[in-house]
């Protein structure tokens, strides 16, 4: 049975992005407002007023890119396929596997086979045959965002003269934005990749948006809320990944591991019970321990 027809665990992280260096997510169109610079920050309407924001797709893209680099460095194409070279992508390999199955067994590839045969990066962020386990919402301002106009030119490497410009750009220079990260039916090492990406942002290894080589796009990330949705029979000090939550048959079919769990000392601030699930809400202080334990699971699959 496809895993996305069931719900064994889920995580919701509330995060706050604090701007540390000029930030610009370029709009793809031209605004009708003549006072805005040529390079404009992407905008939307929030509570009836126009506002800049950071698209969730941009955040998910930088998370995926960073995780790909790390997993490919340690595990090669098992860690991350090459989506640029189509012949080395999971999509191409899955097409070949499906063709073989049709020729030999007369059947389509099963959902568990798609998951099992996908690289580790695709297992969390998805591909054209596999739904993503992770999603990130748009980041909207929390309070005032200060913007300013910067001016620049493009210099020719051959003549060392101005090749293009001058041009102006709108950048955000201070303020905070809030977003949420969701995981569903995740393995614990996959939570570790989210912790890894958040750490990369805080360490300055990951930057967002335009002008990264100019020093733009550095942000700090604070995890403000942590909420797990788990089965009601999961012990209070444990957090279970999907491998420990499913039947042995499903575990084997998908390539999960039965020891997919972490033990933490932090206690939830609030617990809500319903018919099937237990929702645990932890304080932001608990994230350090949860992050550390999930990163140890990630290190385990990389060793």
Image (cartoon, rainbow, N blue to C red):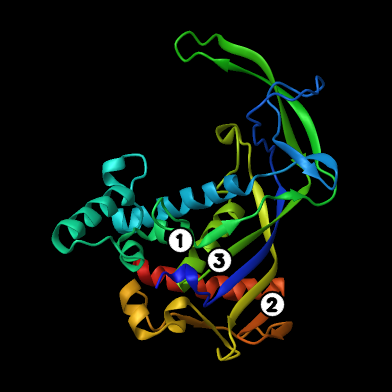
Q: Residue furthest front?
A: 106
Left or right of 251 in this view: 233 = right
Whole-number angstrom distance, CA of label 3 to CA of label 1: 9 Å
Residue identified by numbered label 1: 124
Q: Residue at x 52, y 78 (%)?
A: 8
Residue identified by numbered label 3: 183
Whole-number angstrom distance, CA of label 2 to CA of label 1: 23 Å
Does the residue at mark 2 contact the one at mark 1 (Cβ under 8 Å)? no
Q: Nearer the viewer, residue 259 or 3?
A: 3
Per the image, label 3 sits on a secondary structure element best described as: strand
- The quarter of the displayed image where residue 155 is located: top right
Position in image of residue 283 (x %, y %): 72, 75
Q: Can you tell which mark lies on residue 282?
A: 2
Q: Nearer the viewer, residue 178 or 272?
A: 272
Per the image, label 1 sits on a secondary structure element best described as: helix
User: Vertically, is 274 above or below 169?
Assistant: below
User: Vertically, is 94 above or below 174?
Assistant: below
Q: Residue at x 72, y 43 (%)?
A: 53
Left or right of 30 in this view: 119 = left
């Amino acid at each position: 049975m496809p895993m996305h027809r069931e719900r064994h665990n889920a995580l919701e992280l509330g995060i706050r992005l604090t701007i540390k260096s000029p930030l610009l997510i370029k709009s793809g169109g031209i605004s009708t407002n003549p006072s805005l610079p040529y390079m404009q920050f992407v905008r939307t309407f929030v509570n009836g007023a126009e506002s800049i924001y950071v698209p969730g797709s941009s955040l998910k893209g930088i998370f995926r890119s960073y995780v790909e680099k790390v997993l490919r460095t340690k595990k090669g194409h098992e860690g991350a396929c090459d989506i640029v070279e189509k012949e080395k992508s999971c999509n191409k390999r899955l097409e070949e596997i499906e063709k073989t199955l049709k020729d030999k067994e007369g059947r389509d590839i099963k959902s568990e086979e798609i998951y099992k045969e996908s690289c580790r990066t695709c297992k969390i962020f998805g591909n054209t045959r596999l739904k993503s386990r992770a999603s990130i919402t748009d980041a909207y301002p929390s309070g005032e965002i200060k913007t300013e106009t910067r001016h620049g030119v493009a210099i020719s490497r051959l003549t060392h003269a101005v090749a293009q410009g001058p041009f102006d750009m709108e950048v955000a220079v201070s303020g905070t934005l809030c977003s949420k990260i969701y995981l569903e039916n995740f393995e614990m090492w996959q939570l570790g990749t989210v912790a890894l990406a958040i750490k990369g942002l805080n360490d300055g290894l990951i930057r967002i948006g335009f002008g990264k080589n100019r020093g733009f796009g550095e942000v700090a990330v604070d995890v403000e809320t942590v909420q797990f949705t788990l089965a009601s029979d999961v012990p209070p000090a444990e957090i279970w990944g999907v491998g420990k939550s499913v039947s042995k048959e499903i575990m084997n079919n998908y390539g999960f591991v039965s020891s997919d769990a972490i033990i933490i000392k932090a206690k939830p601030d609030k617990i809500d019970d319903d018919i099937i699930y237990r929702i645990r809400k932890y304080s932001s202080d608990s994230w350090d321990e949860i992050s550390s334990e999930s990163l140890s699971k990630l290190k385990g699959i990389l060793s």
